[in-house]
Image (cartoon, rainbow, N blue to C red):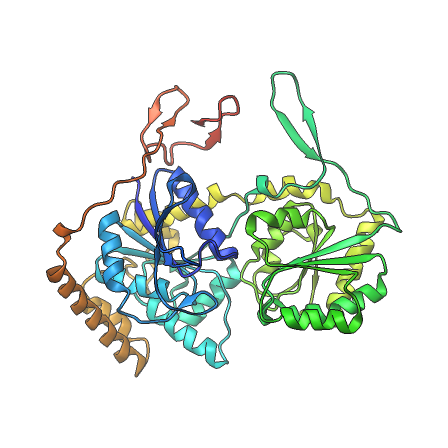
Amino acid sequence: MPYNIAMVSDFFFPAPGGVESHIYQLSSKLIDRGHKVVVITHAYEGRTGVRYLTNGLKVYSVPFLVIYRETTMPTVFSFFPIFRNIVIREEIQIVHGHGSLSSFCHEAILHARTMGLRTVFTDHSLFGFADAGSILTNKLLKFALSDVDHVICVSHTCKENTVLRASLDPVMVSVIPNAVVAENFQPKSYISKSRNEMDYLRPRPLPQRVGPGDTIVIVVISRLFYNKGTDLLIAAIPRILAAHPNVRFIIAGSGPKAIDLEQMLERRMLQDKVELLGPVRHEEVRDVMIRGHIYLHPSLTEAFGTVIVEAASCGLYVVCTRVGGIPEVLPAHMTTFAKPEEDDLVLATGKAIAALRSGKVKTERFHDQVKMMYSWTDVAQRTERVYDGITGAISEQDFYGEHANAPWSASRVRGYALIDRLKRYYGCGIWAGKLFCLCVVIDYLIFLFLELWAPRSRIDIARSWPRKPFINDKNKPVENGAYRRRGTDLMDRRNGSLVLR
């Protein structure tokens, strides 16, 4: 059956980034599968209130104070009244939060459980265990995930990290990677090849060869922050250019490290070899990437790295650091790995340049290979199965498999009873557990007050976005959600309608 889902996060469009793109693409594909999805985020650059995006995706932009890197100030309880109003108006059944650093996400999970809703959390980042910021973040994560129904991570490395940080049962954590819309990241040169007159035209990339004297362009598209390896990039660029005179750089992105990068270029007088584009919108990323031959990704920590998948889809050879979940993303023939060190990054980039000049790397095949590996439709199907598992649409045996009857956890269905919730929060620490229990009790009292002060009967139910019915293989309309799990969704190339094979 279709679900009413609320995606909640501080990170959403128009801000660029992997989390923002993930939420939008996942929401759009879930809508295609018959579900109702709304996004709840904070106001961006005057975007306050309700807006509709492509495919009828409804976005609530709540005016809250942003304190750092698009993260709102944690208030714990002040978000509850408007969140409750949105949930009741949209008849939400599942609240899906995104991002360990999102205050909206953690608060929404707490309030949703108080209101008796099912909750899912997706973690997109990796964090340490030693510095003060990580310790505070991990404690906040443990608080939010103590009462969540299920957790999704974007890589196996991310899963291990999240399980340790939040002391979770590993069986309650699923790995569902990011994806890419391959059609939006096609290589530069294409030819059209037709099988026969009645078949459709299928574009294919032309082989690209780089001669010994040709210029190789290295592209970098990243936020210019410390964790993205900007300091490493600043140190490596002069050495790479000195060793390879016929190399140029194109760097897109913004951040606090941009001034350091500009100062290095002025000191070394490399302005003619390094082009700085500043911030670019996501729809412009492909136009930047097809100008290059190699994509350089010097990140110091990364849970997945969607941008390297986009680069490979554009036909670029990828040089990246072997950190976090990056080694899980692309096969070995598409990448050259380096340690997160200056010397090794310079060496790996030199190997990539030599491989391109020798013709050993067939980058014209990358696009079709990436298209087969990553699909947002597949991500939506796997996420939908998580929803089925936490709502009871499928049995625990089907959802958890051989771990359903594990002795250490008799049942993983989270109860809504206040006493059961307090038991889960109390085990979070000697002092933190008591503080968490106090927050839950106050949240429950606020909920009771809101039920009396603003009864549900006074809140209007929002009308759903009108959608065209799907067409099955017998040319009959199918109601939203009725086609799920009945077959593989394929697009009819003759008329563009969705059919079932």
Q: Quadrant of residue 273?
A: bottom right
| Name of the residue lying farthest toward the right | 213
- Left or right, 375 with respect to 425, comes to right
- Residue name at image x 39 percent, y 24 percent: 472
Viewer-closest of 23 and 304: 23
Please determine whether, in this image, residue 258 is positioned above or below residue 149.
Answer: below
| Name of the residue lying farthest toward the bottom | 431
Number of numbered discs on residues:
0
Position of the C terminus, as image quadrant, is top left
| Name of the residue lying farthest toward the top | 197
Viewer-closest of 470 and 158: 470
| Name of the residue lying farthest toward the front | 46
x, y (%) of residue 249?
A: 74, 59
Is residue 473 among what the camera can see? yes
- Residue name at image x 80 percent, y 69 percent: 269
Viewer-closest of 221 and 359: 221
Please determine whether, in this image, residue 332 is positioned above or below residue 324.
Answer: above
Please determine whether, in this image, residue 341 is positioned above or below residue 280.
Answer: below
- Left or right, 493 with respect to 213, comes to left
x, y (%) of residue 315?
A: 69, 45
